[in-house]
Amino acid sequence: MKKLDELDLKILDELYENAGSSIPKLSKKLGVKQSKVYSRVKRLIRKGVIQRMTIKVNEEALGFNVKAFVGVNVESLEREKAAEEISKIPEVVLVSEVTGRFDMLIEVNVRNLEDLYSVVSKKIAILPGVNHTETFIQLKKKTTMRKFSLMK
């Protein structure tokens, strides 16, 4: 894909903040004709820069009040299978293979500490090849909005 220009990056900024923004709304906010915004969005989708438009769910409003990150050490021959099995656990939001102290970092959202204990000890730690887990409970969250237009 050719390099993204300033308009492409501004469109990405706006859609990142609100994926539900309509073409007319984007057009007005960016001061560009609707047809141009429409063609740019379509091109960004076609080229795979925009993979999907989605929503952001407030998990706390659904009762998921505890977020934790679980560092996991796994025997190297079992790593791929363990990652696959962990990703099937409903409370698991993200499985990342990483470098450093752990082989994987897993993001978990649960309703309470009892559920967290259950997920870690009865669903993750018992998997074949899992040697060690360490759990980090999120105390506070600071969200930032990514600004693509600043990444020139």
Image (cartoon, helix red, strand yellow):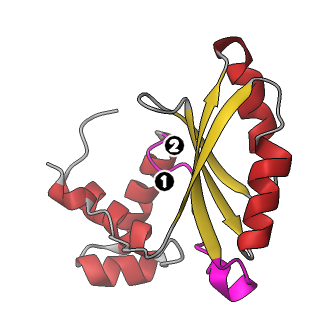
Pick the front one: 125 or 104: 125
Give the vertical position of 87 relative to 64 (above or below): above
x then y, percent, for residue 20:
54, 76
Q: Position of residue 13 (x, y in %)?
A: 32, 66
Q: Specify the amino acid type for callout 1.
A: Lys
Task: Compute the Cα span from label 2 to label 1.
Answer: 6 Å
Front residue of 82/75: it is: 75
- Residue that mark 2 sits on: 46
With 143 as the anchor, is 121 left or right in this view?
A: right
Indicate the position of residue 49 as horizontal and vertical percent values.
Answer: 44, 45
**Is residue 63 shown in magenta?**
yes
Q: Is residue 104 magenta?
A: no
Circles 2, 1 touching at the beta carbon (< 8 Å): yes
Q: Tell me the SS state at disc 1.
A: helix
x 48%, y 54%: residue:
42
Looking at the rendering, the stretch of residues picked out in magenta corresponds to 48-65
Please name the residue shown 45% across and 75% down the image.
23
Residue at image point 73% right, 76% down: 112
Q: Disc 1 marks which residue?
A: 42
The N terminus is located in which quarter?
top left
Pointer 1 local density, CA inside 10 Å: few below 14, some 14–19, many at least 20: few
